Structures are given as C-alpha cells and as structure tokens.
Image (cartoon, grey):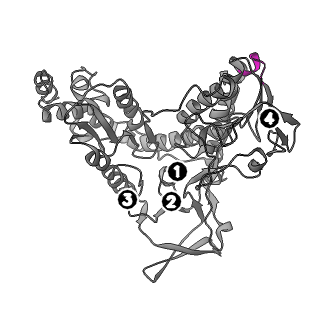
Amino acid sequence: MDVIVIGAGPAGVVAAHRAAHLGARTTLVTRDYFGGMAANDGPVPVRTLAHAARLLREARQLPEYGVAVGEPALDYPRLLARVRDVVGQVRAHSALRANLERLGVAIHEHAGATRFVDAHRIACERGPTLEANRIILCTGGTNRQLPVPGAELTVGHSHAWRLTAVPRSLLVIGAGATGAQVASIFNELGARVQLFEAAPRILMTEDEDVSAAVAAAFRAAGIDVREDFGAIERFEATPGGVRMLFSKDGRPGQAEAAAIVVAIGWRADTDGLDLARAGVQLDRRGSVQVDAYLRTTAAHVFAAGDVTGRLMLVPHAVHDGYVAATNAVRGPTLTVGDRISPIGSFTDPEYAQVGLTEAQARAAADVVVATARYDELARPLIDGRAVGFCKLIAARESHRILGCHIVGERAVELAQVAAVAMAAGATVDMLAGIPLSFPTYANVLGRAAIDAARQLEAPGVWDAAELALAPE
C-alpha cells in the first residue's frame, strides 16, 4: 500500500512514521520546513522568547537575594539569533527524521503548496505529482483574519515573533492563549502593551478564577487589559504606527500602537488543497470533517491535527497522527476517544488546566472545590514567586478528580501531574496521601488535595492533613 502524508508538523511526522512502521510505502510532503509550525513558528521559538522574559524577571530579583548587578539590558537581535539557533538545534536533533529515513520514508521538503489533482493524486508547487492508495491530511492551522477595512496594517502572532526590534508599544487583539502569551512576553521585553478582548473576560476557555487572576496579574505588571471593549470598525495608518477605531453601544473609541497583533483564533489550513476533487468535505467551521477514526468524507483520505479543528495542540496532533495512520493502513480499528488533556501557557504568571472548569463540574455533578494559595507555601515564598493558586474539583460521591486549575510558577508542569492522577483514576484521597517532597511547587497540589479530602471526610486522611497544615 502507498500512503502520502501532507504536512510535516507533529501530526504528519508521527503519521508518516506509523504508516511506514506498519509496512506502507510512505511519502511525506511539506510546504516548508520539516517540523511544521510547532518547531519553526510555535512552541519552540515562543518558549525560547518566554525564557528570555523569565531571565529578565529573575535578573531584577537578584538584589533581593544580595546579588549586586547592573540593570539588565535586552539585545533583541541577539535574542532572535538565539531563537534561530534553538530552532536549528531542535531540527538537527530530531530523532523522528532519522527514524523516518531509516524506515524508507521519502521526504519532500520545501515542496510549496500542495493540491489534489483527483481522488488519489496530488501535485506539489515545487515538487512531483504523487499518487497513493491512502492520503493523510496534516496541514495544520493558520491565523484567523479580521474582515475589517485596514486589516492589512496589522500582523499575526507569527510576525510578532519575527519583529527585528521590540516595538515601543504593542496592541494585541484577542486574549486567548496566543494573545495572552504575546502580550505577556513583549511586556516583559519592554513594550508598552495593550490587550483587547471582545468577550467579557480574557482566557474565556479557562476557569473564571484563572481568568480573573491572570487579568489582575497582567494589570499589575503594567499591561492595559480591555475586556468587552466593543467591535472594531477599521484600522488606519499613523505616523507612529497603526490606529484601531472601535465602538461600543454607539460610543466611539480608538487606540494606537507602533504595531498591532491580531490573535483572534486559529483555523484549519485548507487553502489551495482543492479538497473537493478528492471528495473531502469541510464542516461548518471550515475544518476537515472527520469521524471517530479520523476518516474524512472520502473513505481513502484521513486527517489529523489542527486541520480537523479539534483541540489544536501538539500532544493531540501527535495522538491524531498515530490514530489516522493506523486506520489508513489497517482499516478503521482505532478511535480517538476521550482523552485527559492538560493545557497551559507560558505567560507571567503561567496558567494551566486539565478537566472540567468549576462551572462545568457543578452543572454535571455534586462536587467539592478546594483551593491552595501559593503565598501559603514555602517554595513560592523562597523563590519570590508567591502569586498564584491551585484549584482542585472532585466529585462528592466518587472522590474522583474532575478538574484542576493552576495559576502561578510551574503551573504547566503541575497540570501534567494532575493529569496523570486523573488518567489513573486516582481519588483526591489517594493524592492527599502521597508525601510530596518539601519544599516544592508540587506541595500546592498536595495541599489542595488534602483540603478536598477533608471536605469529603475521607478516611485515613486526617493525619496527613494535620501534618501538612502544620507550620512549615
């Protein structure tokens, strides 16, 4: 069997590896670089910039610990060089590429735009026309655009990471995960940042307490956060940058910055694929329509990752790639299923979550909610990072953990711990009984578990609770 995988991001690379491992003659085609957005324009470069922001914060803390240094100064071109170096290292050390080559996968990199010629053939802009029995779409996603006059004066988040200098002022439209990350990083790097969100609160997909805490922290850090600001009418060029004109309830408003970044969402990248030639249909959101086996409306075409419009995150893309390739080669045998999905962002402060929000949990079951504060624990106080909390939500009847929401240092890592506990079916009683190392950030998760277990009057938890609640 021949398999073509279109797209070499996380979903595509894993799909190609799986198909070849199962014995299919596999070809991997990518428009640009191997690794896709995740390695070249997403988590890897973004996390590198976030680390630079962290170093600046920590440098400013040094006098509190008796370390005398001068005021830190940012050399932005040098930072961008470091970002390029890290991206290059990630590409060079990718074991997956070497594994693909050992499995005999034909890799066509920088092939340009790809389109269907007919049901089984694809043509590459800068490459060959290929034919296969099975085709897997892993073309990822792209920024949503604002359909207003002057939108061409704005840039997407990808352009923000490629600015040649930190702008003196930056206006970010959209306060989801991407917009919040852009705002947080560039604020720390020295830009004067305004963050505009049309919804009633920033981070609308997060628990309400998380949204409120991050918004408060952003404002305390000097970011001008505007929630429920109204509707954008147009953008205009100014001598110093770009002006946004908007209105709310008939009242006009305006805001100006040296650069405006639009981060209003991420959509499936299906442009130019000519999917109709293969019988592949899109859903109402413009994503490739798939079933539980990641099979499209054309039985021989599968799709994985962001192009399906489901959870647009690297871990989910990886899992999708494995499932899609397995089903493409063996037939429909695996389903994507329900997954425990920890999600987080490297803002300052970090935030992360897994499972249900408090509102969702209360609508579905009788629950208890326990919250532990960072400023009540030793490690955050030691590190001078005492802003934050951990909220655990547990079912009253089963004591199972339904959700975990964290704001603060190491939040993203802590959410992974909670996710493992949830995937294992652990109760809060079990989590409360684990003697976590002291002093660590994990203590905030343990403290929340102990509080939840006490509310549930779980047997065998009292001694642990008394120990944990003793003065540290």
Give yes or no for residue 93 being in the magenta stretch: no
Q: Which residue is mark 3?
A: 219
Say if 387 sits above or below 92 in the image: below
- Quarter where residue 340 is shown: top left
Residue 300: percent from left, percent from top: 72, 35
Q: Amino acid at mark 4?
A: Glu
User: How many neighbours does mark 2 have within 10 angstroms: few (below 14), some (14-19), or many (20 or more)?
Assistant: many
The segment highlighted magenta reads: 100-105
Query: What distance separates the C-alpha of mark 4 from that of mark 1?
Result: 27 Å
Residue drawn 43% across the image and 44% down it: 57
Q: Secondary structure at mark 4?
A: loop
Residue 441: percent from left, percent from top: 32, 31
Q: Does residue 208 appear in this view?
A: yes
Q: Which residue is mark 1?
A: 178
> Would residue 216 be found to the left or right of residue 24 on screen?
left
Q: Amino acid at mark 1?
A: Thr
